[in-house]
Structure formats: structure tokens, C-alpha cells
Image (spheres, coloured by chain):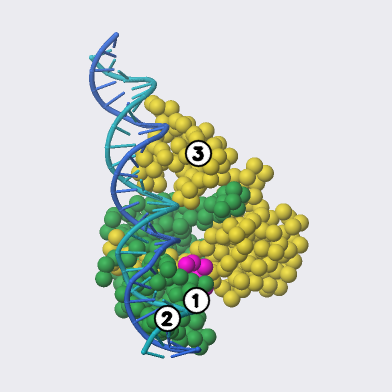
Chain colours: A green, B yellow, C blue, D cyan
Amino acid sequence: MKLLPDKTVERLSQYRRAMLKTLASGKHHIYSHEIANILHITPVQVRRDIMLIGYTGTLRHGYDVSELIEIIGTIIDSEEGTRVAVVGAGSLGSAIIRYFNGKRTKLSIVAAFDVNPDKLNKLYAGVPCYPFEKIQEIVKQENIQLAVIATPASETAKVAEALVNAGIKGILNYTPSPINVSSQVYLEEYDMVTSLEKVAYFAKHGK
Amino acid sequence: MKLLPDKTVERLSQYRRAMLKTLASGKHHIYSHEIANILHITPVQVRRDIMLIGYTGTLRHGYDVSELIEIIGTIIDSEEGTRVAVVGAGSLGSAIIRYFNGKRTKLSIVAAFDVNPDKLNKLYAGVPCYPFEKIQEIVKQENIQLAVIATPASETAKVAEALVNAGIKGILNYTPSPINVSSQVYLEEYDMVTSLEKVAYFAKHGK
DNA sequence: ACTCAACTGTTATTTAAATCACAAAGATAA
DNA sequence: TTATCTTTGTGATTTAAATAACAGTTGAGT
């Protein structure tokens, strides 16, 4: 299958979660406009995304909810599951761990890292916290493929470098310091301050 | 001034933060390609964004760092400052409060809300936590314009409705439940699970 | 004074994403 | 049966964002 557009991947993740909820409510078929309503987008958008993954609904009943969940899974999940580390076990880091914990998904957070000795050897929602120095060793040993950075901004560059050296495949950076990594590593950055400033701008100027 | 593009607003926020750092390091002039390097984007992008806000650099010295900070401020800040509430004082909510606290900016988090009585009347990094029932009263009394939702997903709809009724102008929703609000209210949604699933997809399939 | 190199500012072009518009087809009802 | 309604699937179009291309300018070096 061809590489999917960025935005389509994001929506697929959302479709799946919406479908899991739909299925839990006992509904087995769903129309594009119903999915669209849940996510507040247009029905065409939904149909096009679904078209892109090669799934096709039935004309009079729309999409089969379980099949859709299944297909999306084959696309965005890794069959054997994906193992994730969180670097920085401060308030944001532990919030992230707690947030993912309990969601049933193929993504599992299996390790936290911190420099603060107080936090070491503790469990965060069942996830062990290791000293930052051991990051390379643990990443390999635990077969960790992705990392979330939630350290103070001052540490970002150092952390990113260590992660890349350890052979990580993808990074989600919640720090406000932009990083650059070899193009082998997929990088996504998200900055809460920027987001809130954007909300402030558009709330004020209208849109 | 005309309404700026979405992405430009996001980058302006980042330019400003980068410029504050630059200024702190004692540098008073900066070229577009230097800014571009910091954020890992192209120099043209930087120049275009700056063009859109009507600022213009000097040919041989690039941009005046302080002026740039100043101008960006007049665009994305509200002169009198913007007052923000965080709904949900769980681990994510308090991480957000702590995260903003200390950053000097015109955005200030002035209230938290929660239903859990244990959390009420506590301070989170200096921010008082009020009972959720008082949200309308406090929003008006404290002149709060924006809200961040960081409750469990099950509460999102109720919270959003209360916020809209209280006359909030913009919402940043960190919950995985999409909400819909009157078009008077600017809404931004961010979902960590979707983000991480996206990283997983592109880390696996390459890009 | 003249040339060159290094910037900025901006128009034109390309690319990515969303939307429109409509053909095709299954169910229902007359 | 035949017409009609509803829904999917998709080519064509539009819109938003990023990139390319380049004219214009200023200072440094000679």
C-alpha cells in the first residue's frame, strides 16, 4: 500500500477510537455521515480516507464497524506491538504514562527515564523508571522503538542525541526546544505554549 | 491587519520564543537563515511569515531581535493579557499548570477546576482549584477568556457546554473526545494517542 | 567608484489537503 | 417492473501551505 497522507493517518486513529466506542454501544454498521458527525468533519473526508486504505463499505448499510477497526489496525499498528519509552518522569512525563496506561492499544509504554535519583526504581502506573545513563542499554534490551521526550527544555538536545544513538525509530517531542535528528528517525513536535497562543490569537481575531 | 494563516501563527509563537533565547545570549540581530536553522525550517518560510506581519528587516543585518519580539507580541498577545483556566486537576491538568507557570508570557493560568473534593482549595503551582460547579461564576468573576480541558474523556462534553455557557472565547481540548461548540468559540483539539500512533505509523513506513 | 557577495521582500509555481460534483448501485415503494 | 431515494466511490476542482525563483539593495573589499 502507498504511504498515506499525514492527515489521513491522524484521522484513521480517531476513526478507530470512535468505532471502538460505537461497537461498545452495540452498533455494528455505520454511515460515513455518522462518523463525520462524531468527529465534526465532512462525510466526503471520511469516505476518501477509507477509500485510501482500500476498504469498501456496503451501499445500503455503510461500513461494518468491526471490519473497519480491524483494517485500521492492520495499517497503523505493528503486528507485534510497539514499545515506547518516556524520557523525563516529571509531572508531564508521568501524566503521559498514566494517560496511555489502560488504553488498550498496540502501543505500550515500557520504560521511563529520569536523572533525578528520587524517581529511579519507582513505578509510574506500572512502568519502571531507569537512570538516564542507562538509556542505550535499556532501549536495546527492551526492544524500544519509540520515545516521548518530556524533560525540561534544556535537556532536549542531549536526550534526542542519546535516543538516536540508541537506535530509536521515532520521537515525539513535548519540549519547546526544536530538535533535529537524522532523517532515519521520524520526528513529531508538539508545544503546548504555541498551541495555547494560537488559541488566544484566533479566539481574539475570530475564525 | 488581515487574519494570518494558521501555520504562520504557530510559527510566530516559536519565533518569539527562539528570539527571547537569542536575546538572552546577547545577540541583537539575526538572519532569516539563522532563525530557520533553530526551528529546522527554510529561510524563505521565515521571511514570508515576517513579511505577513508587516515587519521588515534591514538588508545587511537581518532582523532586529528585540523589535521582532515586540512586533510578534503586538500580534499574538492581548495587550491586557489573557486569563486561562484549566479544567481537570489530574496529572495532566497539573502538569499543564506547572508547565506554564514561570514562562513569562501574557497568558496566565489563573484557575483550575475539578470535581474531586480532595483537590479543592489546593494550589497548583500557585493556581487555586475551584469546584467544577462554580465554573460559570468564577469564569465571569475572574474574567477568564480561554480554557484548557484536561479531564477524563467521559466529562468532555459536559465541561465544554459549561465553558461555552460561561462565555469562554477559546478552548484547547486535550481530551480524546471531539467536542463541538458554537462557531463563536475557537476550538483546538490535541490528542496524544493519535499523535503517538502517527509517529508509530511513519516510523514504521518511513517518511 | 566599481564589483561582488549576501541578504531581504515578493511574485510565481508546486505540492498537499479538502471539497465539490456526480456516476453507480442497492433497497424500497408504487 | 419501474421510479425514487440513499449511500458509496472517485475524478475534477478549489483552497491552503510550502517552495522556488529572482529582483532589488546595501555594505565590504578593492
Decide if residue A182 is on the left or right side of residue B158: left
Mark closer to the observer (3, 1): 1
Between residues B155 and D6, which one lies in front from this camera angle? D6
Q: Mark 1 highlights which residue?
A: A34
Q: Are marks 3 and 1 on the same chain?
A: no
Task: Report the predominant secondary structure element of the magenta stretch.
Answer: loop
Question: Callout 3: residue from which chain?
Answer: B
Kindly identify which numbered label has been placed on residue A184.
none
Residue A13 x/y as whole percent:
42, 71
Q: Vertical placement of B200 versus A16: above or below?
A: above
Mark closer to the observer (2, 3): 2
Q: Residue at x 38, y 57 (%)?
A: A159
Residue B148 x/y as whole percent:
60, 61
Helix, strand or loop for disc 3: loop
Q: CA distance from mark 2 to mark 3?
A: 47 Å
Q: Mark 3 highlights which residue?
A: B53
Question: Callout 1: residue from which chain?
Answer: A
Question: Which quadrant of the figure contains the N terminus of chain A?
Answer: bottom left
- Magenta residue span: A38-42
Residue B161 in sight: yes
Q: Is residue A179 magenta?
A: no
Between residues B179 and A103, which one lies in front from this camera angle? B179
Answer whether labels 2 and 1 touch (C-beta < 8 Å).
yes
Kindly identify which numbered label has been placed on residue A62.
2
